Image: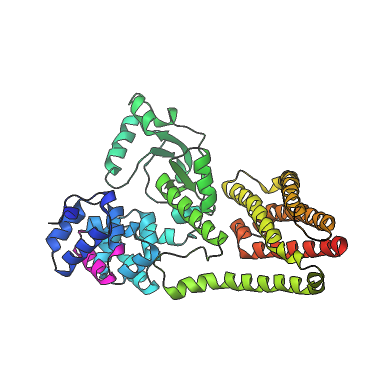
Amino acid sequence: MPDSLQRPGVLDLDAQLVDDVSVLVEAGQRGMVLNLAADLHPADLALLMARLPAEQAHTAFSWLPDAQASEILLELSDSQRRDLLHTLQPERLRRLIDALDTDDAADVLSDMSDAQALHVLPDLADTHDVAALLEYDEESAGGIMAREFVSAPPEWTLERVIEAVRQHASDIDDIYAVFVVGANDQLEGVVSLKDLMLAPADRPVHTVMDRDVITVGTDMDREEVARIMERYDLVSLPVVDATGGMVGRITIDDVVDVIREEAEEDIQIMSGGSGIEQPDDTVWAVSRGRLPWLLVGLFGAGLSGSVIGGFEVALEQAVVLATFIPIVTAMGGNVAVQSAAIAVQGLSSGDIWMDDLGRRILKEMGVALLNGIVLSLLLCSAVAVLNVGHVQLLVATLASTMLTVILVATTNGALVPFALKWLGIDPASAMGPFVTTLNDIIGLSIYFLYATLIYL
């Protein structure tokens, strides 16, 4: 047996291991593949399967026991999971989904076709709970919560509550606390496992519960849920309906996934992508997501060219002006990205509020003024040593342009994320091609206006 197949770990997941497994699957060596899979964490095994050819991945997955296969489903990308689900028989699909928590089961069902989901859903053990979760928006608290949680009436003794935890331990992953609910499922408090174990067993649970419970509604955006759990260092967060009745809980592992997905989406949007692009997407899907932004950039570049063309006479009279066009556009774009990045980050994390707009603009303008003066002095000092005519006028033109462009671009960079947030658009779009091109157009217009007034 190759060395790479002995007892692989995270660091052993390399191209050689993928090749070895591919050979084993092709040869029908089911026992050896299962022996290898038993030593791998589900996340590592999912990564390994994602590297195999689709047909071999489907074969390997069909060999896995249900318990392991259900865990791997959660680790696959959405597109990989959809591709795999189409190859499974309804009975096995039901078994795999029944092994999952309700929130994970709902995620898997949402990746199926409507016909396939409707065929499997009625036969699930938790049909009612899973169907209820499917009614919520995927971007909301209801869409990421799990319906499983340990609850107890306020009059129960701690001994009885502990017994309830034991009974549910095999059905509910990651029990962090017990939720105390009264009539009509009204959430009255929460008891941590630490308090549950340390207090006398004969005490009623309502005497040790924490009544100051942080909750979220089912319709709250999942980004806001993540901010709340991060702000208050929570590992479990109860979700309540409009009447205050508890309907589910969100755990820290769900929030980590949300933070990662939102960060990936923002990075793609900031670079002019669709925000939903996956590494295994088809060429057509990737192109369809990127092309609209490139068309916006092309249109904006055309407008920038029109600005330059409008000052053709000025360029003919002073060709040296063309030398500094890249500097003007580059500096405007750089300072806009810097100020926009801080605004986008703050708005996304909740550290900056919409009410902070005026204070944010004033601060950015102060920074822009200081940086603009320094950069203008450096550029003008370099220009002063050049052997060009009317050097004093050129220096004055460049100094005025640099200072104004940096002030305007910095203000735009700070202002646009607030405007997008107010319009209900992801502020990360403020760092995309549209805003970058807009700064180029404004910067060039300012440059040639100053050149016309001062230099020519």
Q: Nearer the viewer, residue 109 or 443?
A: 443
Q: Which residues are magenta?
A: 51-65
Q: Nearer the viewer, residue 269 or 400?
A: 400
Write the residue at 63% across / 54% down: 337
Report if residue 243 is visible in the image.
no
Write the residue at 31% across / 30% down: 159
Task: Tell me residue 301's x, y (percent).
Answer: 66, 71
Task: Tell me residue 440's x, y (percent).
Answer: 70, 63
Q: Is residue 289 left or right of residue 42?
A: right
Task: Tell me residue 44's x, y (percent).
Answer: 29, 54
Farthest residue, direction front: 387
Q: Nearer the viewer, residue 422 or 89?
A: 422
Task: Check the image and tell me how it is coloured.
Answer: rainbow
**Magenta portion: prevailing SS class:** helix
Task: Tell me residue 278's x, y (percent).
Answer: 43, 64
Q: Is residue 253 left or right of residue 293?
A: left
Q: Quadrant of the N terminus?
A: bottom left
Q: Is residue 54 left or right of residue 275?
A: left
Q: Is residue 275 left or right of residue 410?
A: left
Report if residue 388 is visible in the image.
yes
Write the residue at 53% across / 51% down: 223
In the displayed structure, would residue 133 be above or below residue 57? above
In the displayed structure, would residue 198 be above or below residue 423? above
Q: Quadrant of the C terminus?
A: bottom right
Does the magenta segment cover residue 434? no
In the displayed structure, would residue 114 be above or below residue 241? below
Write the residue at 43% across / 27% down: 207
